[in-house]
Amino acid sequence: MKRENSDRLFEKAKKLIPGGVNSPVRACKSVNAEPVFINRANGSKIFDADGNEYIDYIGSWGPMILGHRHPAVIDAINSALNSGTSYGAPTGLEIKLAELITEAMPSVEMVRMVNSGTEATMSAIRLARGFTGKDMIIKFDGCYHGHSDALLVEAGSGVATLGIPGSPGVPKSFVAGTLSLPFNDIKSVEEAMKKHGSEIACIIVEPVAGNMGLVLPCDGFLETLKRLTEKHNSLLIFDEVMTGFRVAYGGAQSVYGIVPDLTCLGKIIGGGLPVGAYGGKREIMEYIAPQGPVYQAGTLSGNPLAMAAGIATLTELKKAGFYDSLNAVSEKLGNGLSKAADKAGIKVSVARSGSMLGMFFTENNVIDFESAKKSDLKLFSAYYRRMLEKGIYLAPSQFEALFVSSAHNAEDIEQTVYAAEKVMAELKDF
Ligand code: HOZ
């Protein structure tokens, strides 16, 4: 594997950009590697600055469910581009995307577009506080809801990857009202709500956690959150930035049959361009300015290029059978990875929700952040580096998910499983 160009670019980037990257996990620190710099991508493949080709399972961390450069998305962006790139004014495109989202998720009666998942969760929490008149919030250890101050407590994703509890620069008073509880622990939520229910504005959760690796909700967990938020006049916020339009067209809420009060979206709804959104019950959403008193705004919100890419993406996803074939390919990958580990006698725990997968290097059932952290991180690092050398582009962290796209075909999966078998055999006596 050639690396001269990536190495040269990384050296230069480090002089100009903190850590040489614009988002921490990309620096590949936790896996003792250095990033490859990307030149281009097409379908299921991504190509680096040295001409190496990889099968891409990062998919821009979730948005690329159709693979890279899907013709319908490229055409939509091109045609929007020819009309202008930003107006800071309403357009018909944002109505169309809002229509698609509200049709897909009946819990979302109104939706506000923003520019990232971080903005979506931060704004949804402000709205929950404004609407309920309460200040405290509950989140779960290992769930990541972006990098706004109040949510950087026991967070997943890059915070977990770097092994830091939170971040300097977040005043204690900003997180004093954030309770972080173990994911899937029904009892601890019951106790917290019993004690603090009258002060809790909302419970925010990734219904399928994708930022501590992939962790599925246990039976009754999401139902309990729904019941308790209703009982205590708090709001239930589903952070579906990753799972929305990913685990099913209607998101995790359609898979588990739970109706949240508010939903946060991002990634897929922007078709690969920067977008976020939050939406929910009409009476709650009407609390947002200019209709209501809770302020939130954005110059690039509803950006026409992003709206066009999102509309084209959701239009493809709506086609009959889309999720059946995507999930079937993803299932093959999950089974193949399990078998590869079995063959080598390496204990792993593989989880899947639709086309989102995770593999922990542990024999234990992973149900929360504590059990996720028991994964053998050294073994994961070695696995990551060897898979990259074999042309498989995985997230450089145990605490991220793996994403399959509709562009991944049987050959990609066979090649990936074959690489995993070879790597697992090499790591047998690690
Ligand atoms: N932390 C995000 C994924 N869960 C984004 C990572 C990146 O873009 O580098």
Image (tube, rainbow, N blue to C red):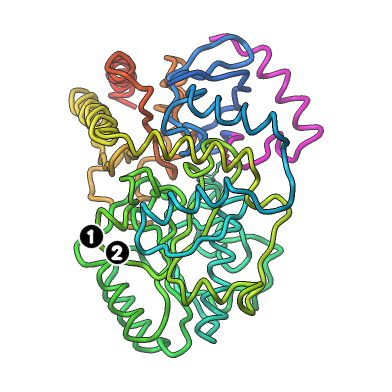
- Quadrant of the image where one finds ligand 1: top right
First of labels 2, 1 by sequence position = 2
Magenta: main secondary structure = helix
Query: What amino acid is at disc 2?
Result: Asn
Image position, residue 423 (x, y; %): 34, 19
Kindly identify the residue that appears in the image at 48 percent across and 80 percent down: 201
293 to the left or right of 327: right
Alpha-carbon distance for marks 2 and 1?
6 Å
Residue 17 lies in magenta, yes or no? yes
Relative vertical location of residue 27 with respect to residue 170 in this rendering, above or below: above
Farthest residue, direction front: 92
Residue at image mark 1: 218
Corner quadrant of residue 413: top left
Residues packed near mark 1 inside 10 Å, few (<14), some (14 to 19) or many (20 plus): some
The answer to whether the residues at label 2 and label 1 have Cβ atoms under 8 Å apart is: yes
Query: What amino acid is at disc 1?
Result: Cys
31 to the left or right of 321: right
Residue 262 lies in magenta, yes or no? no
Residue at image mark 2: 184
Kindly identify the residue that appears in the image at 34 percent across and 88 percent down: 194
Image position, residue 286 (x, y; %): 54, 74
Q: Which mark is residue 352?
A: none
309 to the left or right of 195: right
Establish whether ligand 1 lies closer than 8 Å to the Cβ of label 1. Answer: no
Q: Quadrant of the C terminus?
A: top left
Give the extent of the magenta segment.
1-27
Q: Secondary structure at mark 2?
A: loop
Corner quadrant of residue 287: bottom right
Relative vertical location of residue 313 with respect to residue 50 in this rendering, above or below: below
Kindly identify the residue that appears in the image at 62 percent across and 26 percent down: 78
Q: Secondary structure at mark 1?
A: loop
Image position, residue 385 (x, y; %): 47, 24
